[in-house]
Image: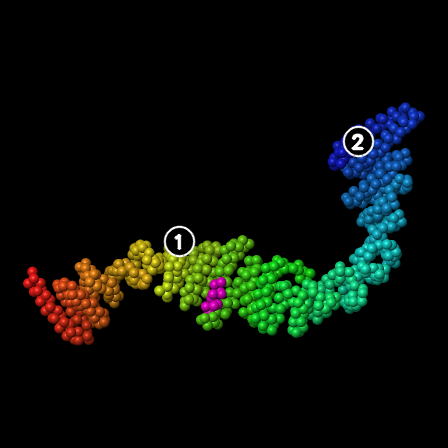
Amino acid sequence: MASKTGRTWLDCKEPQKADHFLRLAVKSLETLYSQLISRGDGAADIASSKGDVEKDLLRILSCQAESALSQGNNHEAVVYVQRCKDMLLRLPKDTAYLSLMCYNFGIDTYNLKNFEDSAFWLSQSYDIGKMNVKYAPGSDVQAKVLRLLATVYLEWDCQRFQEKALNAVNLANKEHVSTSGLYLKIRILLRCGASDNHVRGGLHEILESEVSLDVCLSTVKLLLSADREVLAFEYLKHVCQRFESSPDLGTALVLNIELLLQRGKELLGKQKIEDIITGHYTGKQLTPQALTSLHVILWDKASQHFEAKNYSEALQWYNYSLGFFKGGQMEPNVAKLQRNRASCFLKLKQLEKAKEAIKEAERCDPDSIFTQFSIYKVAVLENNVKKAAEAVSAMGQLSRCPVAHEDKLLVSENAASNLLSLAAQIALENEQQETAMKALESLCENSKDEAQVLTALRCLVRLVLSTIEKSSDEMRNVGLDALLLYIKMALQIVSHQTHMNVEQRTDEANWFRKIAWNSALQCESSPDRMRDLFVLSYQLSQSCLPDRTLLMGQKTCLLMAAAASLKLCRMSPCSDQTEELTQALEHIQICWEVWKTLKASGSFPTDPTDTLLLLYEFEARAKLNDAKVETVLESVLELENVETKVLEIIAALAMEPPAHFPLLCKKALRVALSLHKKQPQADLARCSKCVHSLIKLSLPSGVSEVEARVLEEVWDYYEEALSIIAATSDDFPELETLWLLTRAWNTGILLYSLAQYPEAEKWCGLAMSFVCHLGSLQESYETQMSGLYSEILDRLDKAKKYFAIED
C-alpha cells in the first residue's frame, strides 16, 4: 500500500511526499525478507515469496531513484540504481525494465542540458541491456540509446568527445542500421571537421542503405550548411544516379538547380533547366510537386532580375517557365505568367509582343483584376481613352471580390485599391488626366481603406481644380459639380470613420474645409453651388477642434450659405421657393447659435453679423409669408445705432415679390425718415425717396380705398415733400415734382368724382402748389393746370349751389 501511495505522489510531481511512503515500503519489505530468510531455504513456497519480495523491492528502489533524480540528487539516484543492478542477477527478466528506466533518465537530463549526467545514464542503459541479451531491449532500442548518447556528446563538446560520439553512432549503426543513425554520423563528422574522405565514407554508407530520396537531399543541404559545397554537389550527382529510375528524381534535379542559382551559377543552372524542359516533352516529366517548386524558383529568379531592371533576363526566366505549358493551355498560372511577360515587354518597349502576351492572359483568365490592369497599361500607352476606361470599370467591379495571390506573393486586402491607385499614377505619367480621374473615382467607390480613399479624393480635388482654372463657364460648372461630389465623399468619411485619431481627423477635415471655402468664393455666378460649398465647409469644420478662429469661419460659412440661398430665390422669383427659403432659415438659426457662442467669448463692436442675420431672416420669413416677420422687424428696430440704409432695405424686402407687407414697409420707412431728419445734415435725396415710397404705398388706388384717415396720412407726407423741396431750392428733381403734382391732382379728381368737393378742391389746390417748383416745365403746366383748376373750381361752385337748392 505504501509503495502504491509513493508511486502516486511521484506521478503527481510530489517527490518529497513520495519519499516518505517509499521508505516505509522498503522497510516493510526488508523486514518481511528477513523473516523469510530466518525460516530457512527448504520450502519451495518460501523461495517463491523471497523472489516476489525482491521484485517488489527492485520496483520501489527504481521509484526512489526516480524521485532522487527529479529532486536533483543524481548521486543518490546512482546508488539506488546500483542496488537494482546487483539484484538483476537474481531477477534477469527485469533487465529491459531497468535499461529503459536509465534511458528515460538520460532523456530527462538531456532535456535539462545536463549532458554529463545524461551521458552516464545512457551508458548505464546500454550496459544494463548487454548484461542479459535474452531479456534486454531489442537491438533497435539499443541503437536508439546509442544515437542519443552520440547526440549528447555532439552537443556537449564535439571536439572533446569526438571519438566517443563517433564510437556511439557507429555502434548504434552496427546494432541496428537506420536513416537517423546514418544521418547523425554525417552531422558528427561535419561538426568535428572531419576530412572530405571521412565524410565520403559516411555518405557512401547512406547511398548503400535503403534510404529515401528526401533523406539524401536533406544530407545535401546539411553539407552545404557546413560549407562542403564541392562534396554536396558531388554527392547530389551520385544521388541523381542512384535514383535515376525513381519518379521522384525531379525533386533532386530541382534542388540541384536551386543550389546552382543560389551560388550564382546561372549558366549551369540554365543548362539543367533546358535539359528538364527537353525531358518534359520526351517522357521524363517532373512530378507536379517538383514542377511547382521549379516554377517558383524560375519566377523568383525572374522577379529578381525585373527588380534589378534586367528585363531581358527576367523575360528569359519567365520563358523557361512558359516552356512547361502546352500551347493553348487554360490555367490561371499561365495568365499570371503571360502578364509578367507582358510587363517585361512593356519595359523593353516591345508593345506588340506585350499585347500578344496580354491577349493570352485574357484568354486564360479574363476575370482577373491583374489581367484588366495589364490591358489598362497598354491602353494608356496607346492613348486609347475608351479602352482604358473600360479596363478601369472592370477593375472596379473585380475589386469587390477577394484578390488571389499574384506571383506567389500573398496580396493584402487593399491590393485591388493599390492597383487602381497605380493605374491613376500611370495615366498621370502619360498626361492622361481624364483617365487618371476615372481610376481614382473607381478607387473611391470600391476601396474600404478610408485613408486611401481620402488620399485619392485629395488627388481628385487637385486635378479638378486645375481643370476648372482653364475651363469655359459650362465646363467650369461640370468641374464644380465633380468637386462638390468629392468633398461630400470626404465629409462622409471624416464624419463617420473610427480609425483616425483626433489630429488626423482634424487635418483631413481642415484640408477639405479650406478647399470648399476657397471654391465657394469663386462661385459668384452660381449661388446654388456657392451655397453647397459653404455648407460643406461648415459641416467639415465640425470635425475639427473648436477654437475662436474656427467659430468665425463657421459663422461666415452659414451667413454666406443663407445669402446664396436668398440670391437664388431672387434669380427665380416665379418658382416655388419654399424649400430654398426654409433651408436659408435653418442656416440662419444655426448661425445665431454660433454667433452667441462667439459673443460670449469676447466683444465684436464693429461686426455687422446681427444686422445681416436679421436682414436675411426678415427676407426669408417675408417671402414665406411668415407671421414672425413683424417680430424680426422689431428686433431690427431694437438694434443699437440701426442704420437708415438697413431700414430702407427692410422696406424694399417687405414688398419684394412674393412678399407683401405694406404696413411693415411703411413702418420701416417712417423710422428711416425720422432718423434721416435727426442727422445734423439730413440727406434730402434719401428723405425724398422715403417720402415718395410712403406716398406711393398710402395713396388710394380706387374708390374703396378712399378714407379720411388715409388721406390725412398722405397729406402729411405731401407736406413733408414740400418741406424737402423748399429746403433743396432748385436742386429737387423736376420729374419727382411732376410725379407728386400728378398724384395729388389725380387724388383731387377722384374725390371730385365721389362728390367730395371740399376735399377735391383741397387736393387740386395741393397739386397747384407744386407747379411753381417745376422749373423748365412750369410755364407749360401752369397754363394747362390753371385752366383746368379754374374749370374745376367753377364746377365745384355749381355743384355746391345745386346741392344747396336741393337742401
In the orientation shown, which residue stands out farthest toward the right?
Answer: 42
Q: Is residue 93 left or right of residue 627?
A: right
Q: Residue at point 41% right, 61% down?
A: 561
Q: Amino acid at mark 1?
A: Glu
Q: Residue at point 7% right, 62% down?
A: 806
What distance separates the C-alpha of mark 1 from that of mark 2? Answer: 89 Å
Answer yes or no: is residue 727 visible. no
Magenta residue span: 476-485
In-front residue for pair 315/278: 278
Q: Is residue 151 left or right of residue 327?
A: right
Q: Amino acid at mark 2?
A: Ser
Q: Which residue is mark 1?
A: 593
Q: Quadrant of the C terminus?
A: bottom left
Q: Position of residue 728 (x, y in %)?
A: 21, 69
Image-quadrant location for residue 635: bottom left
Q: Magenta span has 568? A: no
Image-quadrant location for residue 705: bottom left
Q: Position of residue 217 (x, y in %)?
A: 80, 57
Q: Which residue is mark 2?
A: 3
Answer yes or no: is residue 218 visible. yes
21 over 577 or under it: above or below: above
In the orientation shown, which residue stands out farthest toward the top?
Answer: 39
Image-quadrant location for residue 766: bottom left
